[in-house]
Image (spheres, rainbow, N blue to C red):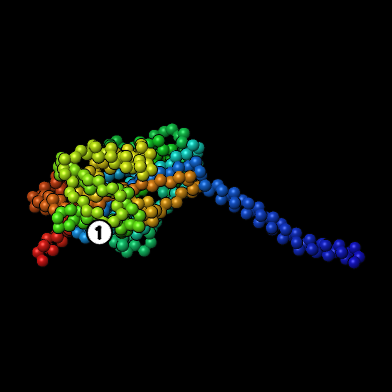
Amino acid sequence: MNWPIRKSLLEMGAKTWLPRLIALGLLGFSLAGWLTAGEQRTAPDLTVHEWGTFTAIAGMDGEAVEWAPLTGSTDLPPFVEHIGNVNFKPGLRGTLRMETPVLYFYSPRDVTVSARVAFAKGLITEWYPHADRVRPGGVLRNTNLSQLRKDGSIAWSNVAVTPNLDGEFPREGKSNRYYAARETSASPLRVRTRVGEQREKFLFYRGVSASPLPLSARLNSDGKLVVNSLSEDEIPTAILFERRGERVGYRFTGTLTEETTLDPPVLTGSVDALYGELEEILVAQGLYRDEAHAMVETWKDSWFEEGSRLIYIVPRRFIDNVVPLTINPEPGQIVRVFVGRLEIVTPATARAVETAVARNDEATLNKYGRFLEPILAIAKEEHSLEGN
């Protein structure tokens, strides 16, 4: 083959293969960049800890009953944001109130993260700092969460974890349980929003759901509490607590894997001693000691108020299934500890509420607050069964 012809063919080949080679090179560069970005999506020295509470009330069969957990006045500072339609919110009916989950971040260096939380059969109802997305948006027409078509969720896309940040966090004049959660060594957070920068020690959110519980608890004919684990995983521990005025008592269950029957606690205990024991349980579950103390300080006046309840550690897999959490970049460690609170309507509780209603005793009724409606409904159902 003579040279002009060969040269022409080589030029044609170059025209054909050169773009391919360039494309392959660009593809290789793109893949390398993608792999690098993938490596950057992990942060081994970032640690995330979370604690929160699931609150429910047991019916006569031991299962969580439907109620309106958002009735009554809010216990949050005014800067906390709420679900859009405030007038609609109190009418929400579900089985589970998720209260004060807080996400703490620990990092030796500045790092920017995003966080997303979903809530099975539920809605996110309160949060702070300002979130980029809260779903579903708009106004829901159906107040029954068991008929919710899509799980609720919340997302923060630009959270700056700044371990060396100085400055104050928002605070109103009067005291509030919300502030106790700040008393930890967690890294401060900065979140840029459309209304300016907001600072906090954690990401905070709450919600309501129609999800079932990981256990049930019912009273038998002898007045004993029959507790059944409904989870594939063991319940690490539970406490049967009762308070009547200044008299308190509690009984530990140990690990729950099947049916357990508990005698009523003797009302000769010390609630101060229980604070310390509960803190030790929370530390054993993975919280730092200052986090465990902050959690007990936040909720001790509520967990140990008038009435009877089962307080238990929620299995981790149940938490991850009902409240799935995604952090990006992925932390080296994520610890999630939730305390379940299941109200038990004992004969003593039913009598106290019925008597208070008959006498218009507001002081006593206020002790039971948002649980009044389900307590009266359960007492009515029990009287109806006794009549039959």
Q: Is residue 227 left or right of residue 15?
A: left
Residue under the image location 38 percent in, 47 percent down? 336
Residue 231 lies, with reference to residue 327, above or below; the image says below
The location of residue 348, given as percent across then percent down, is 13, 50
Residue under the image location 45 percent in, 51 percent down? 326
The residue pinned by badge 1 equals 63
Question: Which three-letter amino acid code belongs to the residue tagged 1?
Answer: Glu
Q: Is residue 298 left or right of residue 328?
A: left
Q: Would you identify the image quadrant in which residue 223 lies?
A: bottom left
Whether residue 282 is visible here, answered yes or no, is yes
Mark 1 residue element: loop
Residue under the image location 37 percent in, 41 percent down? 287
Q: Residue placed farthest to the right in the image?
A: 2
Q: Would you identify the image quadrant in which residue 93 lies?
A: bottom left
Q: Nearer the viewer, residue 59 or 327?
A: 59
Residue 149 lies, with reference to residue 275, above or below; the image says below
Residue under the image location 13 percent in, 53 percent down? 347
The location of residue 50, given as percent across then percent down, is 38, 45
The location of residue 255, given as percent across then percent down, is 30, 49
The location of residue 320, given as percent across then percent down, is 39, 53
- Of the 4 image quadrants, the one containing the N terminus is bottom right
Residue 57 lies, with reference to residue 6, above or below; the image says above
Question: How many other residues sit within 10 Å of disc 1, few (<14), some (14-19) or many (≥20)?
Answer: many
Q: Would you identify the image quadrant in which residue 260 lies?
A: bottom left
- Of the 4 image quadrants, the one containing the C terminus is bottom left
Whether residue 370 is visible here, answered yes or no, is no
Q: Nearer the viewer, residue 50 or 253?
A: 253
Q: Nearer the viewer, residue 349 or 181?
A: 349
